[in-house]
Amino acid sequence: MDPSGETKPRDAALRPVSVPMAWTAPRPQAALDFDPAEPGWDKGFLALCASLLLPGLGPAMAGRRRRGVISFLIFLLMLTAVLACVISTRFLRLTPTAAAILIVYVLIQATDAFFCGRRSHSHMLGNPTLRVCVGILLLPTIAIHYFPALATVHFLHRHFVWERFATAETVEAMSPTFEANDIYLVHRHQPIARWTVVLLAPPDQPYTLVVRRIVGLPGETVVFPDGGRVSINGVRLSTPTLVGQIAKPSHAPLDYSGSPPAPIKLGVDEYFVIGDNTGQAYDSRNWEKVFPGHQTGVVPRDKIWGRVTCIFWPLNRAQAMQ
């Protein structure tokens, strides 16, 4: 019985009473256990790998697009400078230095990309594990990316631009211009003028490349009178300092300095060459064999491999060939 005097049913006292509960936040899902915008080394690693693949790509992925564009433009400018040094005879000896500077720049911009990514608040693929996996997958891609490019450049240079050669037979014939262990570059398509140093194959040694200096050009008449100077079309020329007075070779089956001198009239594609060490050189004056279809002592243009443009090793002897 309640205070009002009424009697309630017995089961009414046993009914449950609902009590309001406090609100609780839902438990976060497992996918949100990390913050995609939180900086970290995984972002830096991804940015570094991306910049090694393509300079400037890493900062752009990290949200620094302007920085990435500037890095890429600087890379293109430096790459253009390297290619200009390779193609140009005047600046060819600067090629190793320019290439080294380019490599250092690529490494510096990749390091900068790492720090840009590490401090970045961009999502950059969202998942840290995914960033690391993509970065690791980029590493072999970088090698595959650079190897064909280097191989292509090497092939084009070797067959169309220039190739590196080491001094061998050249030492005795071209002394003092060349010394033992000199390494020099030869351009395939540079113009050939008088006193140009060229690489060629002698008629009796078709598989041996030697270095000699151009004396006579196509259409000229070459004579070696007494007095240590060469006569071209009846005019005696002064020789370069490294050549000095032209001495009679130790073995000369052909008489180019007799009385009267025996002239050599060069054809439309024929050249006459000598070695700087004129007393010991094996050159146009004493070749015993001839190229098919040509006269004794001359070199056809298609047998001249290219023009020697510089000695680049050792560094203390680095010089351009005038």
Image (tube, grey):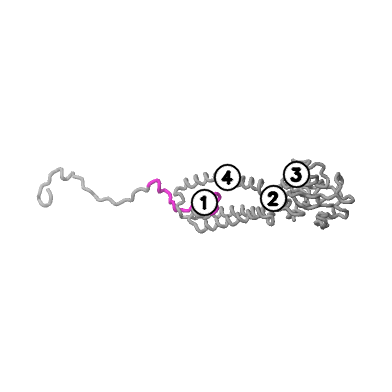
The residue segment tinted magenta is 29-56
Q: Which residue is mark 1?
A: 47
Q: Left or right? Give the position of 137 relative to 90.
A: left
Q: Secondary structure at mark 4?
A: helix
Cα separation between marks 3 and 1: 52 Å
The earlier-in-sequence mark between 4 and 3 is 4
Q: Amino acid at mark 3?
A: Ala
Q: Which residue is mark 3?
A: 201
Whether the residues at callouts 3 and 1 have beta carbons within 8 Å, the answer is: no
From this view, report whether residue 270 is shown above or below residue 67: above
Q: Which mark is residue 105?
A: none
Q: Which residue is mark 2?
A: 187
Q: Amino acid at mark 1?
A: Ala
The earlier-in-sequence mark between 1 and 2 is 1
Q: Which residue is mark 4?
A: 143
Residue at 46% x, 54% y is 122
Q: Residues within 10 Å of mark 4 (few under 14, many from 20)?
A: few
Whether the residues at callouts 2 and 3 have beta carbons within 8 Å, the answer is: no
Q: Amino acid at mark 4?
A: Ala
Cα separation between marks 1 and 4: 17 Å
Nearer the observer, 245 or 268: 268
Q: Is residue 316 visible?
A: no
The earlier-in-sequence mark between 4 and 2 is 4
